[in-house]
Amino acid sequence: MSLGSVPLKYRIQIDRQQCMQCMRCVDNCSYGVFREEDDGNILIDSRKCTACHRCISMCPRDAINLSERPVDYRSHPLWTPEAREDVINQSRSGRIVLAGMGNAKDYPIIYDRLVLDACQVTNPSIDPLREPMELRTYLGQKPSKLDIRKQENGDFELNTKLSPNLELQTPIMIGHMSYGAISLNAQLSLAKAAAKTGTYMGTGEGGLHKDIYPYQDNMIVQVASGRFGVDINYLERGAAIEIKIGQGAKPGIGGHLPGEKVCTDVSCTRMIPAGSDAISPAPHHDIYSIEDLAQLVRGLKEATEWKKPVFVKIAAVHNVAAVAAGIARSSADAVVIDGFRGGTGASPKVFRDNVGIPIEAAVASVDQKLNDQGIRNKVSVIASGGIRNSADIAKSIALGADAVYIGTAALISMGCRVCGNCYRGLCPWGIATQREDLVSRLDPEVESEHVANLINSWTLELSELMGAAGINSIESLRGNRSRLRGYMLDEGTLDVLQVKPVGA
Amino acid sequence: MEPVRIDAKGLHYTPLNQQIRKAVSEGATDIIVDNVLGQRFIADGLKGEVTIRINGVPGGDLGMFMNGPTCIVKGNCDHAPGNTMDSGKLVIHGSAGDAVAHSMRGGKVFVRDDIGYRGGIHMKEYGEGHKPILIIGDNACSFLGEYIAGGVIIALGRSGKVFGGRGVGSGIHGGEIILRGELKERQLGVGAKITEFTEEDLEKIRPYIEEFCEYFGIDPEKYLDTKYTKIVAASSRPFAGKYVWE
């Protein structure tokens, strides 16, 4: 017996009186929703729509309407339309359901239940318009004490050997999105924005394309289990090196870039065969313990003559604090924690939506554990996974992060509408695609401005938030939980966050 | 130019590598390192045309990220020699540990005797001139050539012992694993298959075998026939059918 078709997810309608049949919708939709008929009419196949909004954005007459879920199911609190459609999809295919972007389940967002402090009469606020606000951030190991000696001529000499640190002009970095998962133009836009704003971005596990070389001083090169694109030149080019152990959108599993995305250029950049799947297995083949991780950290440092900081990225999962404490002892300079809202080009949906823990809780527990063990100075903490605005950043830092990575937000600033179909390689915005005609839609000059504007505006907002709290240095906000209060959070969560409830 | 001699006795790996780098930067083409005892990362990330003769037993990750040099080890070797190596040669007069030639994408590794588990894991090739070669004189343990995406692994089985490992070529999506003697289907990993080893295949691997035998003073004739089993990928897209769109 046939399972039949599931109802449409979206319905596209054209206001025929408004439409001037310019065919821009036909040209712009890479999913094939619109088709020009012989008589010049536009035929619509709503079933193919992903709600990417490209047609709506490009229509000069605002003639296109999109509505979500045009057909109702019988309502049921447990068997939601999505749950039923997944069952139907898997009954038909017998396969794992792939999904893009971040966790799409309706979990409570802790950020939205944390409120920031502001000064009133007894402790005055600081006016960022006329007072200098220090947002410069240094990532890397810090000495537990400084050995400074006075020389005979009166000068002071620093005898402590400092570890290499990354200097950021803002605590906002752009997370790792690889060439292959996103287009070269998208990477270029992000790299230019990072250079403009004095921050850093990650290469992801896709290697470093030669067009990105001019921005290599603002790049953090990633070493993942597939070792894609990793050679000594790549390691030497990066300002820092990041070992990817886990990722918030798919903790505990590897990644596969489908063979059709591995064009000649991607193949050369990743240093893998063209046309074959780029398989990045779940574990690193040489890491089965913290000692093994330490071996790789030191191997990377030795290869680059101990001149570059090495980060280790893990997904936020149970016991993340204990893992981070191990990483701090592995000679790593920073631990990156990716929360369960972290985005991705493709993840098994069951992982994206069910595995991992919120970044807010993970950062707070890691910061607390490192403090308790007296090793907080040994490692910087970078939070990522679902950072949506400057308030999320301020809250992350108050919970214990040194800096944050943004990913999806940076893509949205370039046009992404979070349609979640990145894995299909047809992104009409030229971001998650390698199709030349689509890639060329994205102008790196224009989009780098948008990304830079986003980082600059969030940096300004951070200054204002800090000023309001009577803080003029980002270092004074770091781990400063007294600047937070929990609203409608349960006692257990407040305990993990080490945050008082509102009114306390 | 006389070979540069370095005494590694009691030396940590960083100052040892610093001495090697210094010698290379000063134009040395032949370096002898004596009294090596477990120092890791020797020649890590080293570039250039230089031969390093290592007397002793190097620790893990010998020649990691190496690009160009040749390391000749007069002794056994710990785990992962040739880890993510780009080009160059490792010649090991003894046995080596686990994950030999891990993710190597160019150059050659020759191990006279045995290697441990996960040998040649994730080796890959691309474009022109990036083809890694791993030749094992005797035998390897299980999971040989896991996730291999290119290059050639050859195990000669010199002692005549039957290859007993399992999980050979799990997740293989490129490259070849060539074992002397027979292999049972049940010893194969997911996505691997056995194909006929032909005279044409023999001609392709002949130079590697001859080079191997030259390094270790072995008569190659015994190994230049078709008594090999060839393992290749069942598909270059082993997991293409695993997923469905949301």
Image (cartoon, coloured by chain):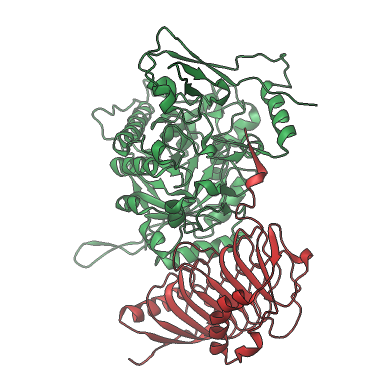
Q: Residue at x 51, y 24 (%)?
A: A33
Image coordinates of residue A388 in percent, x first then y, are 46, 30
Q: Residue at x 39, y 19 (%)?
A: A59
| Image chain in red | B
Residue B35 position (above or below residue A145): below
Q: Identify the residue at the far top of this view.
A: A17
Out of B163 and A14, give the one closest to the viewer.
A14
Give the left or right position of residue B136, taking residue A49 as reference: right
Q: Identify the residue at the far left of this view.
A: A153
Residue A34 position (above or below residue B21): above
Q: Where the C terminus of chain A falls, by quadrant?
A: top right
Image coordinates of residue A94 in percent, x first then y, are 73, 38
Give the left or right position of residue A321, taking residue A463 as reference: right
Out of A251 and A367, give the one closest to the viewer.
A251
Q: Residue at x 39, y 40 (%)?
A: A186
Q: Residue at x 42, y 22 (%)?
A: A25
Residue A255 position (above or below residue A411): below
Image coordinates of residue B127 in percent, x first then y, are 45, 62
Residue A344 seen in the figure: no
Image coordinates of residue A399 in percent, x first then y, are 50, 37
Out of A165 and A435, give the one closest to the viewer.
A435
Residue A137 seen in the figure: yes
In the rendered picture, chain A carries what hue?
green
Tally the numbered discs.
Answer: 0
Q: Identify the residue at the far right of this view.
A: A1
Q: Where the N terminus of chain A falls, by quadrant?
A: top right
The picture quadrant where one finds residue B48 is bottom left
